[in-house]
Image (cartoon, rainbow, N blue to C red):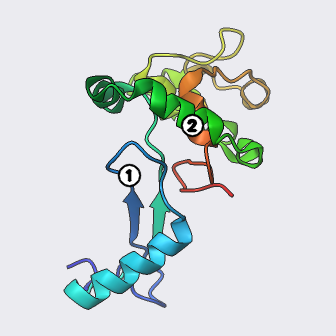
């Protein structure tokens, strides 16, 4: 239906993007290769077109962490993330150019930190009403072990892979 209205069609300017999360306890495959595969298969089987596919790594928090613990794979998955650390991805992690804002205006470095209730550094504005671009641009980002999910392999953000 979206395709019929022009979304995902070349030249319309109307974007239709897909997001891919791995189903198992592994890193996403190459975003470029996967996008080509999805384009080919969705066209062939369903005549569906789209613009971009973004791969996102599962971070070891919330429901995904619960499933890791249930399967006894928590340590294995953390080892995978740590051993796949890619320094080239650090410059592009979304907390460096984006803030997450809760319904009541409370600020977080990203939506993962928001899910974990880790607010912005106490030395900078805590709510959108106190917004201070200079202070927030220079803030210390609150990092923890889940951040290895953003820097593993090709890197991961809400705009897909980073390298
Ligand atoms: S999880 Fe960590 S590295 Fe990733 S965006 Fe949030 S604060 Fe940055």
User: Label 2: few (<14), some or many (≥20) within 10 Å?
Assistant: many
Tell me if residue 86 comes above or below residue 132 in the rendering.
below
Tell me if residue 105 comes above or below residue 160 in the rendering.
above
Instruction: Tell me the CA gap for discs 2 and 1.
Output: 14 Å
* Nearest to N terminus: mark 2 or mark 1: 1
Question: Which residue is located at x 44 percent, y 46 percent?
Answer: 26
Task: Looking at the picture, tell me which residue is in the foreground, 106 or 26.
Answer: 26
Compared across the picture, whether 136 is left or right of 71 comes to right
Question: Which residue is located at x 72 percent, y 10 percent?
Answer: 123
Compared across the picture, whether 88 is left or right of 94 comes to right
Q: Quadrant of ligand 1?
A: top right
Residue 32: quadrant of the picture: bottom right
Q: Quarter holding the C terminus?
A: bottom right
Can residue 8 be seen here? The reply is: no
Q: Residue 52 location, x and y as percent?
A: 47, 72
Task: Looking at the picture, tell me which residue is in the foreground, 138 or 24.
Answer: 24
Q: Mark 2 = which residue?
A: 81
Task: Looking at the picture, tell me which residue is in the foreground, 38 or 101.
Answer: 38
Tell me if residue 139 comes above or below residue 41 in the rendering.
above
Q: Secondary structure at mark 1?
A: loop
Question: Which residue is located at x 61 percent, y 18 percent?
Answer: 120
Q: Secondary structure at mark 2?
A: helix
Query: Quick one: which residue is furthest to the top in this view?
Result: 122
User: Label 1: few (<14), some or many (≥20) within 10 Å?
Assistant: few
Q: Residue 144 location, x and y as percent?
A: 59, 20
Q: Mark 1 = which residue?
A: 22
The reply to whether the residue tagged 2 has its Cβ within 8 angstroms of ligand 1 is no
Q: Residue 118 location, x and y as percent?
A: 52, 16
């Amino acid at each position: 239906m979206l395709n019929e209205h022009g979304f995902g069609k070349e030249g319309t300017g109307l974007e239709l993007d897909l997001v891919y999360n791995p189903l198992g306890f592994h890193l996403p495959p190459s975003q470029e290769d996967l996008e080509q595969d999805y384009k080919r298969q969705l066209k062939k089987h369903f005549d569906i077109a789209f613009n971009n596919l973004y791969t996102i790594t599962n971070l070891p928090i919330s429901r995904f962490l619960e499933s890791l613990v249930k399967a006894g794979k928590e340590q294995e998955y953390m080892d995978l993330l740590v051993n796949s650390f890619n320094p080239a991805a650090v410059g592009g992690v979304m907390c460096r150019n984006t803030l997450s804002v809760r319904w009541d205006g409370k600020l977080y470095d990203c939506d993962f930190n928001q899910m974990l209730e880790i607010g912005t550094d106490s030395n900078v504005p805590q709510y959108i009403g106190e917004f201070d671009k200079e202070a927030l641009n220079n803030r210390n980002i609150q990092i923890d072990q889940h951040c290895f999910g953003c820097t593993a392999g090709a890197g991961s953000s809400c705009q897909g892979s980073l390298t």
